[in-house]
Amino acid sequence: DAVQITMCPLWPLHYVILYILFIVPLLLVFAPTVSSRQSASTRLKVNFSPVSVKKLEEAATVLVNFSTTEVANLKDNNYYEIQSSDDGVAKVTSGQIVYLNATPIDAKSEWSFNLTGVFMGYAKVKVKLKTTSSEVIGESDDLPVSVVRKYHVLDKIFVYSIIGLVSFAYINMGCTMDLDVVKKVMRRPCAPLIGLISQYIGMPLISFGIARLFLPLPSLQLGMFATGCSPGGGASNIWTLVLNGNLNLSLAMTFVSSIAAFGLMPAWLFSLGRVIFTEGDIVVPYRNIASLIIGLVVPLGIGLAIQRWLPRLAGFMRRILRPLSVCLIIYIVVFGTVSNLYIFKIFTWQMILAGFLLPFLGFAIGATLSRIARFPLEDIIAIAVETGVQNTGVSIFILRLSLEQPDADLTTAVPVAVAIMTPIPLCILWIIRKVWTPKKDINDNPKGEPIHTIESYDDIINNAKRPEDSLLDDKAIAIATQTSDQGLYI
């Protein structure tokens, strides 16, 4: 008798319900709130010169003048106090308090103070009028302040290195991508479609919600949101193989996700991202973001052209991938750490928690959607891993080259936190599978069926050269050529 498959009674409305469950919490998170508390102090009419302090370097000092038109109404027992909203960013080093009883009020209406940059970021400076009992009876509007790092040659070298590495990664993707595998997978597009939905609908919304809940600064929120809008990372192919997932599906999804990023990533940044840009008073670099994302098409096209018309060169690139990738990884870890030590100074528990939640919830939404669609376990693993593992290199590339300082430096810290925390849930899952999954004896495989496990990349290469003796199938061999410089960014 034929087996009758019972469909979900809400099908296909359960997808709409799931989408609503994502949207409603987010609307609650960033819905504007109105405070009913009124300030007891009056507004002082204070004029600052300069009207803003932008890009003040760390350890540098600037002289700020301020004046008021309300001198006649002041009493000689009051005093001005100049306060910074964050002394860890910018600090008033002299002229912090001005006692009016020490100055002839009728003779002077202008004063000054020194402001010193401490650490990159944003702060606001106010002038407060206080009585002898320290009661605030008036305060001025904010003087916006931004502090930037001192840039050295190492910073420029690292930025150019990121440009080269990301470009090389996309050239390599074009060289090593087996388009026949992509075509084969896309003949049954349900799994790639679910992966695309979870990647470019679920992840941007999740990252936006996490950013609004845990990250206070708009620049950090933008870094989290940009990471959630990024395509899947090359390391997802490695993790899919390690966890015995569908490698062909993972490879196809990586390619499709990278292509879709050219349109969907700027679409999210220019739509929902406007909320963050507006609140943080961040200049939206529309042209820079669009040109950089579209610019990634060029190296990808070069790679595909090499594979099509220069197969020998493509084969040579495959052979040098492993040693070159190892060297580049060491270079990024060592050189990137030395030139970006500031990142670890701004790490907070909120940022670490947010960096963990993004990939974890990505794995969860990918697994949930593929489970609802009743895919086999191998496909569920591939979709979940591909959704949760983001190509943080792309987000770093876009943010560092699009934004002005200090936003470029601040936003970079978030994708780094995500990259550090991403392997944790995957390692836990791998340990669980190793402990709970019984090992198969080679004698239980008399027909020589493919075994989807590997010892090292050398095993893949050696067995690829001796296919008649190999117990590895095409999926395992493919990872030797497919996993390349893409894996540099977790």
Image (spheres, rainbow, N blue to C red):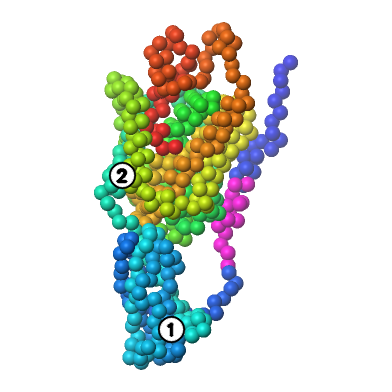
State the quadrant of the N terminus: top right
Specify few, some or many for label 2: CA neighbours under 10 Å numbering under 14, 14-19, or 20 or more: some
Q: Can residue 205 be seen by looking at this rendering? A: no
Residue 59 spot, x, y in % from top left: 32, 63
Image point 50% across, 48% down: which residue? 352
Taking the magenta stretch, the answer to whether it contains residue 38 is no
Q: Can residue 356 be seen by looking at this rendering? A: yes
Callout 2: SS:
helix
Up/down of 278 relative to 380, above or below: below
Asked if marks 2 and 1 touch (Cβ < 8 Å), the reply is no
Image point 33% across, 56% down: which residue? 149
Residue at the spot of label 1? 79
- Mark seen at residue 105: none
Taking the magenta stretch, the answer to whether it contains residue 24 is yes
Magenta-drawn segment = 21-34
- Position of 349 compared to 300: left or right? right
Residue at the spot of label 2? 158
Up/down of 415 relative to 1, above or below: below
Image point 47% across, 61% down: which residue? 279
Residue 218 spot, x, y in % from top left: 46, 57
Image point 36% across, 35% down: which residue? 329
